[in-house]
Image: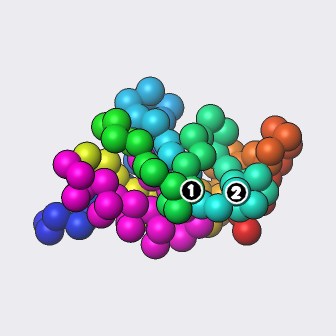
């Protein structure tokens, strides 16, 4: 297993970690994407802003590209975190909860 695979988790594993309270989910998408649909309880910190330095974070974006970039940026600062393989698209495709800015059913854009 190379280093990059250790920095990634499946949707199922991310869901389990969140459900068990073992991590915080940070959504690194842009504001319009987050408002349209996000994981309930996720923190919103766009990749274009300063990412937090706390550990036990799971990063998510639409497909996994931006969250991988965020993991790399944080790793360069000595922060260990992981990203979700397949991002919000796979999260929603597996039937997991997605809500919009008003708490109603959301969509991934």
| 9 displayed left or right of 88 | left
Q: Residue at x 22, y 58 (%)?
A: 76
Q: How is the image coloured?
A: rainbow
Give the residue at mark 1: 46
Question: What separation in Å lies between label 2 and label 1 (alpha carbons)?
Answer: 7 Å
Instruction: Give the x, y percent position of residue 14.
Output: 44, 46
Is 31 located above or below residue 13 in the figure? below
- Near mark 2 (Cα within 10 A), the count class, few <14, some 14-19 or many ≥20, is few
**Are the residues tagged 2 and 1 within 8 Å (C-beta)?**
yes
Q: Secondary structure at mark 1?
A: loop
Is 88 located above or below residue 14 in the figure? below
Q: Residue at x 67, y 50 (%)?
A: 38
The residues colored magenta run 58-78
Instruction: Give the x, y percent position of residue 79.
Output: 25, 46
Instruction: Give the x, y percent position of residue 72.
Output: 30, 63
Magenta span contains residue 56: no
Near-viewer residue (98 or 26) = 26
Q: Pick the quarter of the image with the N terminus.
A: bottom left
């Amino acid at each position: 297993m190379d280093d990059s695979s250790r920095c990634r988790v499946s949707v199922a594993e991310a869901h389990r970690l969140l459900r068990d309270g073992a991590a915080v989910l940070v959504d690194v998408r842009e504001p319009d994407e987050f408002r349209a649909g996000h994981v309930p309880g996720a923190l919103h910190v766009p990749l274009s802003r300063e990412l937090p330095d706390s550990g036990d974070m799971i990063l998510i974006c639409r497909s996994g590209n931006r969250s991988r970039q965020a993991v790399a940026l944080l790793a360069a600062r000595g922060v260990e975190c992981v990203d979700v393989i397949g991002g919000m698209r796979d999260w929603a495709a597996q039937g997991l909860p997605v809500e919009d800015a008003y708490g109603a059913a959301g969509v991934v854009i």
